Image (cartoon, rainbow, N blue to C red):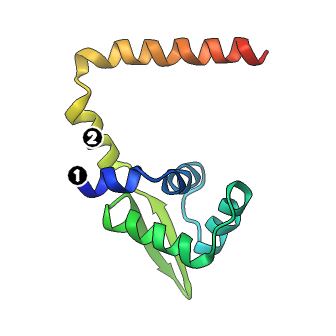
Amino acid sequence: MDMVFKALADPGRRILLDRLRSQSGQTLGQLRQHMNQHAPMSRQAVAKHLAILERANLVATLRRGREKLHYLNPVPIHQIGQRWIGKFERGRLDALAELKQTLEGENHG
């Protein structure tokens, strides 16, 4: 669990996870290209972040020929939710999240 929290503590790694959530099965090059749209990052830096995410079991990889594809593994994040967000709280948190989205939509519209 400590490795998961350490991995999630870095904003760059959270961007990588968001990218894999939106489109799983990406190569290092594809992920680096997306990262450079947010904050320029070397290939080695992206690889280092991905290695940390892999050690935390947040990213799974699959070799396809010479390519290494990266996939989001949501299980550790789900386990965190199960441990610290009880079922009795989930309804209230969902309502707050929905209210926040509604208010943000009104502010942008």
Question: Quick check: 86 left or right of 30?
Answer: left
Question: Which numbered circle lies on residue 1?
Answer: 1
Q: Nearer the viewer, residue 5 or 83?
A: 5
Question: Which numbered circle lies on residue 13?
Answer: none
CB under 8 Å between callouts 1 and 2?
yes
Figure check: 27 above or below 34: below
Question: Which numbered circle lies on residue 80?
Answer: 2
Q: Nearer the viewer, residue 15 or 6?
A: 6
Figure check: 13 above or below 79: below
Residue 34 image position (x, y, % from top left):
68, 60
Q: Quadrant of residue 107?
A: top right
At a point 28% along the width and 17% down the height, the residue shown is: 89
Mark 1: secondary structure: loop
Q: Nearer the viewer, residue 19 or 15?
A: 15
Give the distance between the C-alpha atoms of the residues marked 1 and 2, in whole angstroms. Answer: 8 Å
At a point 48% along the width and 19% down the height, the residue shown is: 97
At a point 32% along the width and 61% down the height, the residue shown is: 57
At a point 24% along the width and 15% down the height, the residue shown is: 88
Identified by mark 2, the residue type is: Ile
Residue 19 image position (x, y, % from top left):
59, 53
Q: Earlier in the sequence, mark 1 or mark 2?
A: 1
Residue 1 image position (x, y, % from top left):
22, 52
Q: Crowdedness of circle 1 by 10 Å Cα count: few (<14), some, many (20+)?
A: few
Q: Quadrant of residue 102?
A: top right
Q: Quadrant of the C terminus?
A: top right
Residue 92 image position (x, y, % from top left):
36, 12
Q: Quadrant of residue 27?
A: bottom right
Question: Quick check: 85 left or right of 16?
Answer: left
Mark 2: secondary structure: helix
